[in-house]
Amino acid sequence: MTEEERAEQERQKGWVKARLECDYKPVFSDLVETVKHDVKVFNEAANASIEAHYDKDDFRIYVSPIQKGRDNDYVEIKLVGKCIKVKQNDKHFVVTFEWIESELRCRLMINKKEYTFPQISQKALGPLLFKDYPPAVES
């Protein structure tokens, strides 16, 4: 058996764990961790003061700048049923996910287009962190 075949066999053995992680609470938790990491990196690199408040009881993270005059700038990411709603000021989009049995993985989607956790974080935080970033398109 080749190294590649062994790696594939191990991946297939892990299908139960991977399937359990493709559920609304683990997916939301992974997205929250990605967003918190990105906010921390931005604050350190740009010497900025963006806050990320996570309310795990309400399954919600709220990200906003600590600056006068930007009181209305925010991003809210909230678990709503079995999907994730991302709200940016007056715009929003919805993240859905599905288990791909043939590939043994979870697919994250916005308007039926696949995204990774970092891409979703970028789409959510981009307009808040970078003023030249295009806003999200409402879904």
Image (cartoon, grey):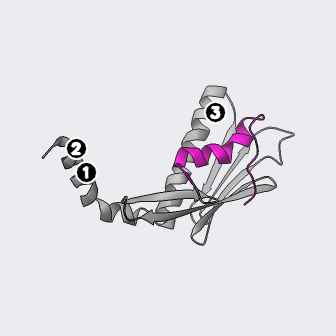
Instruction: In this rendered view, identify the residue nearer to me: 67 or 7.
Output: 7
Q: Quadrant of the C terminus?
A: bottom right
Q: In the shown orientation, is residue 49 left or right of residue 18?
A: right
Residue tagged by mark 3?
43
The three-letter code of the residue at mark 3 reads Asn
For the point 84% across and 39% down, the residue is 68
> Residue 111 placed where, x, y %?
64, 59
Q: In the shown orientation, is residue 91 left or right of residue 16?
A: right
Q: Nearer the viewer, mark 3 or mark 1?
A: 1
> Pointer 3 and pointer 2: residues touching (CB < 8 Å)?
no
For the point 63% across and 33% down, the residue is 43
Eyeballing the image, is 70 above or below 84? above
Q: Is residue 126 magenta?
A: yes
What is the number of the mark on residue 8?
A: 1
3 or 1: tag closer to the N-terminus: 1
Judged from the image, the secondary structure of the residue bearing numbered disc 3 is helix
Residue tagged by mark 2?
4
Density class for disc 1 (Cα within 10 Å; few <14, some 14-19, many ≥20) is: few
Q: Nearer the viewer, mark 3 or mark 2?
A: 2
Q: Which residues are magenta?
A: 114-139
Judged from the image, the secondary structure of the residue bearing numbered disc 1 is helix
The three-letter code of the residue at mark 1 reads Glu
> Pointer 2 and pointer 1: residues touching (CB < 8 Å)?
yes
- The CA span between labels 3 and 2 is 40 Å
> Residue 44 placed where, x, y %?
60, 29
